[in-house]
């Protein structure tokens, strides 16, 4: 092979390699996150650096305690930050305000995409925040909930209205107990009431505790007005969420509405008496019309018929002449 042929072959191989490299699919970069500085107190801002995240998508940045082993229960989800990555960004630097997570450290900055199919972590020290051993996720809920419901209307008028099936006020008492050896926050409580167990039509929002210390119990009583008609059973349900699995408890109240029942019986009795009176009066009239004797006139004899004929007045005769 001549030198010219060898050079042409080398040039062709280089061109083929360049074409194959240009047309080969790009290997997707693994998303990563880093934090600077690596230690900050709550309220201070750090720079979260994002690399390799899909373009034209959004990510969520959250600070978590317990090394985020139990998911959102360890994270300050209410202090999360959303950020959109444009198609022109190879990397992004996002200012992020540090907050105290609901669980003790070790703490991390967690970054996820909108579908949570991609996730990355970066360690961070939260100055002044407690540190404890890592607690793994458990199947048991971290909260226990107790519920009691009683009628709360005051005064004779409220009692009468309730006994007639009208709008009734109840006192809803909820007790929430923290079962885990750490403080819990962002606890949300919702209550519902309905005529049947699956008919929870009356929605009640309860402001839960901002923070519940380890082993502590939180008690709250709230007045709830149920619109009329309130007759029979009411099914109440309270659910606690925001800290691990949802915990729910139910209770049942009954309102017999005795005055409404008595009034209904009295109205039915009065209507029945009036109907019977009308029916009896109608039958009495019919019986009286049937009992009257029919007068039958006997035929007159010949003499009686002659006497019964009217007597015509006599015609005046001619006057007598003297």
Image (spheres, rainbow, N blue to C red):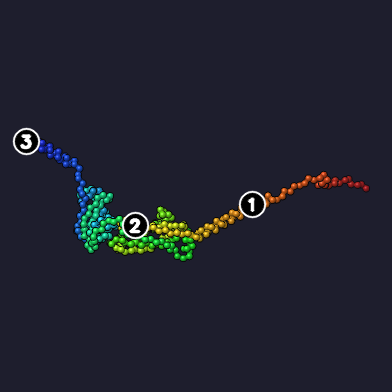
Q: Secondary structure at mark 3?
A: helix
Q: Residues within 10 Å of mark 2 (few under 14, many from 20)?
A: some
Residue 48 sits in quarter: bottom left
> What's the CA distance linking mark 3 and mark 1?
136 Å
What residue do we see at 25% from left, 48% from top? 56
- Specify the farthest residue to the left: 3
Q: Quadrant of the N terminus?
A: top left
Q: Nearer the viewer, mark 3 or mark 2?
A: 2
Q: Going by the image, does 224 lie left or right of 38?
A: right
Q: Which residue is mark 1?
A: 283
> What's the CA distance linking mark 3 and mark 2?
83 Å
Q: Indicate the position of residue 197 as horizontal and vertical percent values.
A: 41, 54
Mark toward the start of the polypeptide (3 vs 2): 3
Q: Nearer the viewer, mark 1 or mark 2?
A: 2
What residue do we see at 43% from left, 57% from top? 234
> What's the CA distance linking mark 1 and mark 2?
68 Å
- Specify the farthest residue to the top: 1
Q: Which residue is mark 2?
A: 247
Residue 138 sits in quarter: bottom left
Q: Residues within 10 Å of mark 1 (few under 14, many from 20)?
A: few
Frontmost residue, 55 versus 209: 209
Is there CB contact under 8 Å for labels 3 and 1?
no
- Specify the farthest residue to the bottom: 155
Q: Is 84 drawn above or below residue 221 in the view shown? A: above
Mark toward the start of the polypeptide (1 vs 2): 2
Q: Is 230 drawn above or below residue 28 in the view shown? A: below
Q: Residues within 10 Å of mark 3 (few under 14, many from 20)?
A: few
Q: Indicate the position of residue 80 as horizontal and vertical percent values.
A: 27, 56
Q: Indicate the position of residue 145 as horizontal and vertical percent values.
A: 35, 60
Mark toward the start of the polypeptide (3 vs 1): 3
Residue 3: numbered disc: 3
């Amino acid at each position: 092979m001549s030198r010219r042929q060898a050079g042409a072959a080398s040039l062709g191989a280089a061109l083929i390699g360049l074409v194959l490299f240009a047309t080969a699919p790009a290997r997707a970069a693994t998303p990563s996150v880093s934090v600077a500085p690596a230690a900050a107190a709550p309220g201070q801002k750090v720079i979260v650096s994002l690399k390799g995240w899909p373009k034209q998508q959004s990510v969520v940045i959250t600070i978590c305690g317990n090394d985020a082993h139990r998911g959102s229960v360890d994270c300050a989800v209410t202090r999360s930050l959303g950020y959109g990555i444009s198609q022109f960004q190879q990397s992004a630097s996002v200012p992020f305000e540090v907050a105290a997570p609901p669980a003790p450290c070790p703490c991390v900055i967690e970054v996820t995409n909108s579908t949570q199919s991609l996730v990355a972590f970066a360690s961070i020290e939260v100055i002044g925040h407690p540190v404890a051993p890592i607690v793994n996720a458990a199947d048991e809920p971290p909260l226990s909930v107790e519920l009691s419901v009683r009628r709360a209307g005051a005064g004779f008028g409220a009692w009468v209205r309730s006994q007639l099936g009208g709008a009734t006020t109840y006192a809803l008492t909820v007790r929430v107990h923290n079962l885990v050896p750490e403080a819990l926050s962002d606890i949300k409580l919702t209550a519902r009431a309905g005529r049947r167990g699956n008919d929870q039509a009356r929605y009640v929002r309860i402001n839960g505790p901002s923070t519940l210390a380890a082993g502590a119990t939180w008690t709250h009583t709230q007045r709830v007005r149920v619109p009329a008609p309130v007759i029979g059973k009411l099914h109440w349900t309270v659910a606690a969420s925001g800290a691990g699995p949802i915990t729910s408890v139910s209770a049942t109240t009954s309102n017999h509405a005795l005055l409404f029942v008595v009034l209904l019986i009295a109205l039915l009795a009065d209507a029945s008496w009036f109907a019977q009176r009308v029916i009896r009066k109608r039958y009495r009239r019919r019986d009286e019309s049937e009992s009257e004797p029919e007068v039958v006139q006997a035929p007159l004899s010949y003499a009686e018929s002659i006497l019964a004929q009217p007597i015509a007045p006599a015609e005046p005769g001619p006057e007598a002449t003297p």
